Amino acid sequence: MSIEDIQIRALNTLIGGVRLAQSKGCYSLEQAGDINNAINVFTSPQQVSQNESSSAPATTTSSGSKKKK
């Protein structure tokens, strides 16, 4: 694995951590917007939609089954 690959994986890990923190309400709306703009510099729109769909929190439906938001 090249240094560039390692850096990309590390950056993706940091982005995932920031998204998790935001999902728990750790940032103000203004901070979240600034962070989102910074993340968008490093991710393509396709990566963002894949990451959001894979990290969407599960919710319980009225029937008791789980689904992603």
Image: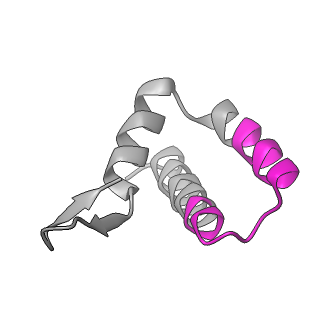
| Residue extending furthest toward the top | 45
Q: Find the magenta span and give its range.
A: 19-38
Q: Position of residue 3 (x, y in %)?
A: 52, 51
From what the image shows, is residue 52 above or below residue 62?
A: above
Task: Tell whether position 59 is magenta.
Answer: no
Q: Where is residue 63 in the image (x, y as percent from the top left)?
A: 12, 68
**Who's the residue at 41% across and 27% down the image?**
46
Query: Residue 26 occupies which quadrant of the picture?
Result: bottom right
Colour basis: one colour
Relative horizontal placement of residue 21, taking residue 65 as reference (left or right): right
Relative horizontal placement of residue 16, taking residue 34 as reference (left or right): left
**In this view of the protein, which residue sits in the foreground, 61 or 12?**
61
Relative horizontal placement of residue 45, taking residue 31 as reference (left or right): left
Q: Main secondary structure of the magenta part?
A: helix
Q: Where is residue 49 in the image (x, y as percent from the top left)?
A: 41, 35
**Count of labels in the image:** 0
From what the image shows, is residue 64 above or below residue 8?
A: below
From what the image shows, is residue 16 above or below residue 37?
A: below
**In this view of the protein, which residue sits in the foreground, 8 or 4?**
8
Task: Tell whether position 33 is magenta.
Answer: yes
Q: Position of residue 40 (x, y in %)?
A: 65, 33
**Who's the residue at 48% across and 37% down the image?**
48
Query: Residue 43 occupies which quadrant of the picture?
Result: top right
| Residue extending furthest toward the front | 62
**In this view of the protein, which residue sits in the foreground, 63 or 29?**
63
